[in-house]
Amino acid sequence: MTTSIAKNIDGVALSAKLRADIAARAQALAARGFTPGLAVILVGEDPASAVYVRNKVKACADTGIHSVFEKYEANLSEADLLARIASLNADPAIHGILVQMPLPKHINPHKVIEAISTSKDVDGYATLSAGELMTGQPGFRPCTPYGCMKLIETTGLDLRGKHAVVIGRSNTVGKPMALLLLQANATVTVCHSATADMGHHTRQADVIVAAVGKRNVLTADMVKPGAIVIDVGMNRDDAGKLCGDVDFAGVRQVASHITPVPGGVGPMTITMLLVNTLEAAEREATRLETSP
């Protein structure tokens, strides 16, 4: 019996295609007199955060989105950060606000996220945004799960009635991922650290999303032949090379489609942040144009 190797789901190519569409929409919005604006706040010296922020600011510049980047020392007070968010909430030139995590220990991240106006919560992390997602209301979807849905879409699979397994239950990826799959009419199972026999669930899945930040959490013997595998993980192997949560070499022998790490989910996260910012600006433009 011959086995076929899974097709790579190319996040770089899809991201480029979506960003071209974002740039065209931003240009159309600018022609109506509105420039989409994103404020990015970085507190402290976390090197990984600095790289993420730099990539976000560059992505804005490349697609015609105005960005404001503000960097503060690690000793910035919580009160001062909340005051700055309040002023950005009131700034008509800013349509999205992103505070890069993690924050210094003396600042409560939940308080900071909740301080961002729901109409500008382009990360989709606030309680109200989570509630909108859960109840099927229009709102901002967290960027990584939103990007995962776009990647699944490229395979041509209709999720209706399919079994999807999400490995991980974080507020930023696992839980919203499960809700988005439910919205697409999939039957969803969420596995986590207390799941007794994860393989029992994953072997029944048509789609598996691995999002726990642990190497080789999904191996070939846990995958049904022909399944679609989305790897959200970002880890380092023994040689220091970037890898995901999935045993890529093994699983690609069984799956029909798989996202590589890097080059899969990663590029999509920033792209969906741009989509959310653009949608925030379009909503605000429509509101201003139609208000008496």
Image (tube, rainbow, N blue to C red):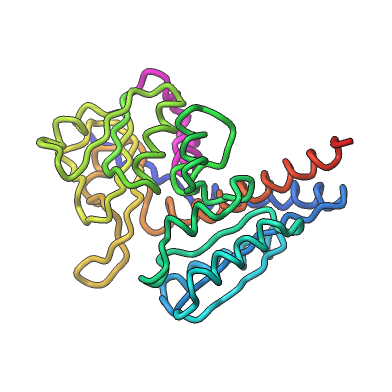
Q: Residue at horizontal 63%, vertical 54%?
A: 96
The number of discs equals 0
Instruction: Tell me where residue 143 appears, x and y as whole percent.
Output: 50, 48
Give the quarter of the image for residue 257: top left
* Front residue (pair 107, 214): 107
* Front residue (pair 151, 30): 30
Is residue 127 in the magenta section?
Answer: no
In the displayed orientation, state which residue is furthest to the front. Answer: 79
Q: Residue at horizontal 24%, vertical 31%?
A: 225
Give the quarter of the image for residue 187: top left
Q: Residue at horizontal 59%, vertical 32%?
A: 138
* Front residue (pair 144, 37): 37
Task: Quadrant for the N terminus, please.
Answer: top left
Q: From this viewpoint, is residue 18 visible? A: no
Q: Residue at horizontal 21%, vertical 42%?
A: 192
Give the quarter of the image for residue 81: bottom right
Horizontally, residue 139 falls left or right of residue 162, namely: right
Is residue 153 in the magenta section?
Answer: yes
Up the image or down, 156 lies above or below 279; here it is above
Horizontally, residue 259 falls left or right of residue 286, namely: left
In the displayed orientation, state which residue is furthest to the left. Answer: 196
Task: Quadrant for the C terminus, please.
Answer: top right
Instruction: Tell me where residue 199 appears, x and y as whole percent.
Output: 15, 36
Instruction: Tell me where residue 26 appears, x and y as whole percent.
Output: 75, 51
The magenta stretch is 146-162
Instruction: Tell me where residue 57 appears, x and y as whole percent.
Output: 61, 67
Q: From this viewpoint, is residue 4 visible? A: yes
Horizontally, residue 232 falls left or right of residue 17, namely: left
In the displayed orientation, state which residue is furthest to the top. Answer: 161
